[in-house]
Image (cartoon, rainbow, N blue to C red):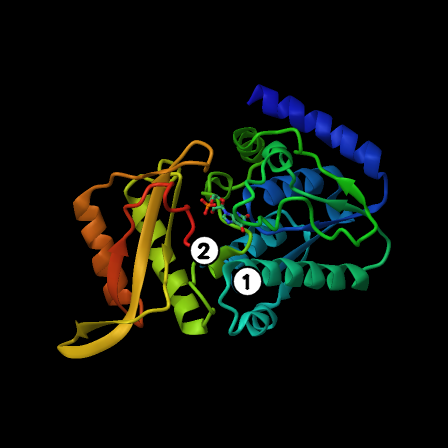
Amino acid sequence: PALAESFIDQQLAELRQQIGDKKVLLALSGGVDSSVVAALLIKAIGKQLICVHVNHGLLRKGEPEQVIEVFQNQMDANLIYVDAVDRFLDKLAGISDPEQKRKIIGKEFIDVFAEEAQKLEGISFLAQGTIYPDILESDGIKSHHNVGGLPEDLQFELVEPVKLLYKDEVRVVGKALGLPDNMVYRQPFPGPGLGVRCIGAITRDRLEAVRESDAILREEFAKNGLEGKVWQYFTVVPDIKSTGIIDGKRSFDWPVIIRAVNTVDAVTAEVAQLDFGMMQHIVDRITHEVSGVNRVLWDLTPKPTGTIEWE
Ligand code: XMP
């Protein structure tokens, strides 16, 4: 904590020195890295920072609301909220190849962000939540669209105040800056978001099933003290249906797949061993509370051979 304080003091001084009275733009996803960068810059330069939060419709339940609550309401930041849900889902309609989905999401994100940037005047800097591992890693198996920086075509000078920090250090800094625990200690979430957990061509019904089942899973893990203990846990909805019985009638609905893994570096991963009663309770809640779902499967595959995400 003392180290965090001195890091923060030093960064605030350096940021003020670098930025002066100019304006800075930041794509604020609500993830740990961009949130910490936002909190630092709000402290350093207040309203000279303009945060843009793009809701691409692939965020988890409650995420856009939390970004608005924390940054606009509590920290009084300059925040532009862009509802781009229809735009993303229209572009993704009928696209089933995972890499193509990632490319569309990545490109659309840059386009939306660049359009917002062009509407603004007098922006000199672009802030980014680049952290040290981003610079080192790119496993070559899947394209990670948030690695390597955002809009290459935008001519701004970069501000990257956490680029020499590891993730756990970023969390310590975020905590010291007063960000809420569920933001600072949140599990990793891919840039393409729920888009790669709604298997194949994304449809709104299955996307909602992913979002609702994910919210139930997170709620139950939190209730059982597993938040921050299990490395990553989420749900997936494939594009197959199976037969079941709901309220005494035949149903033909989607399954939900649950994946909960532990890992050190995401290169290999093991399946989290969990209390069976808790697992049964989660299955019960998802099958009863998520519409269009009649079955739950638990993924017991380590990485390798499975990757952590299904796409
Ligand atoms: P895989 O599925 O490759 O995932 O075992 C390893 C870690 O990377 C995350 N992941 C992504 N993160 N953009 C991201 O920002 C992506 O396209 C992406 N694909 C996977 C995954 O959630 C896991 O933490």
Residues under numbered marks 1 and 2 in contact, where contact means CB atoms less than 8 Å apart? yes
Residue drawn 47% across the image and 33% down it: 265
Specify whether 251 is left or right of 174.
left
Q: Tag 2: residue type?
A: Glu
Q: Residue 56 versus residue 94: which sits nearer the camera?
A: 94
Image quadrant of residue 230? Answer: top left
Q: Is residue 94 above or below residue 60?
A: below
Element on which disc 2 rests: loop
Residue in view at x 56 percent, y 58 percent: 102
Q: Is residue 21 left or right of residue 147?
A: right
Residue 32 position by quadrant: top right
Locate residue 251, reporting x and y percent.
22, 77
- Tell me the residue that label 2 is attached to: 311
Q: How many marks?
A: 2
**Up-down relation of residue 237 to residue 253 (above or below):** above
Mark 1 is surrounded, within 10 Å at the Cα level, by few (under 14), some (14 to 19) or many (20 or more) other residues, namely many
Q: Earlier in the sequence, mark 1 or mark 2?
A: 1
- Which of 89 and 137 lies nearest the eye of the viewer? 137
Q: Quadrant of the C terminus?
A: bottom left
Which label number is shown at residue 101?
1
SS of the residue at dot 1? helix
Q: Residue at x 77, y 34 (%)?
A: 15
Q: Is residue 120 above or below residue 279?
A: below
Amino acid type shown at disc 1? Lys
What is the x, y in percent for residue 229?
A: 36, 35
Q: Is residue 50 left or right of residue 143?
A: right
Q: Residues within 10 Å of mark 2 (few under 14, many from 20)?
A: some
Residue at the outermost bottom position: 249
Ligand 1 is within 8 Å of the C-beta of the residue at disc 2 = yes
Q: Quadrant of the N terminus?
A: top right
